Image (tube, helix red, strand yellow):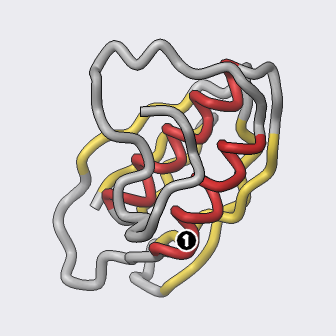
Amino acid sequence: MKYIHYDASLILTGDLIADAVVDYAAVLGANGRTDTITVPSVGDDGSVSTSILLVGPASELCVTVAPDDELEPEDPAFIRRLRDAAGRAGPGRPVDADGGTRFRGAEDSATYSGS
């Protein structure tokens, strides 16, 4: 599980979901674009919920590790949607200093032409 720190809020979600949100924000930033996304999340009471985020060049997101939970949300379809939207966002790509693989967890052939 991971927390997405967004403005003054903490959003609890699955590891791959949080990573995909950051990946998408980086691609949008590289292209000077914005988008709103509905992120699968976990409420304070443990219930399945969603959080709507505005992401783009001005987004200041931070992701930190949260306590593990056996009810960690997994949503490959959500990650695929972000990955596919990233492919349509424009030609710019993030610098990718960490050299990681973007949109892990999409689990099918990629349309995103970044790393």
Q: Residue at x 82, y 35 (%)?
A: 34
Horizontal and vertical percent for residue 66? 25, 54
Horizontal and vertical percent for residue 17? 44, 59
Name the residue beneath numbered marker 1: 40
**Mark 1: secondary structure:** strand
Horizontal and vertical percent for residue 88? 76, 43
- The N terminus: image quadrant: bottom left
Q: Residue at x 50, y 38 (%)?
A: 23
Q: Amino acid at mark 1?
A: Pro
> Relative to 2, is 70 on the left or the right?
left
Q: Residue at x 29, y 84 (%)?
A: 71
Horizontal and vertical percent for residue 60? 59, 25
Q: Is residue 52 above or below residue 60?
A: below
Q: Is residue 51 above or below residue 94?
A: below
Question: Of 90 and 47, which appears nearest the observer?
Answer: 90
Q: Residue at x 82, y 29 (%)?
A: 33
> Relative to 112, is 38 on the left or the right?
right
Tell me where residue 54 sits by quadrant. top right
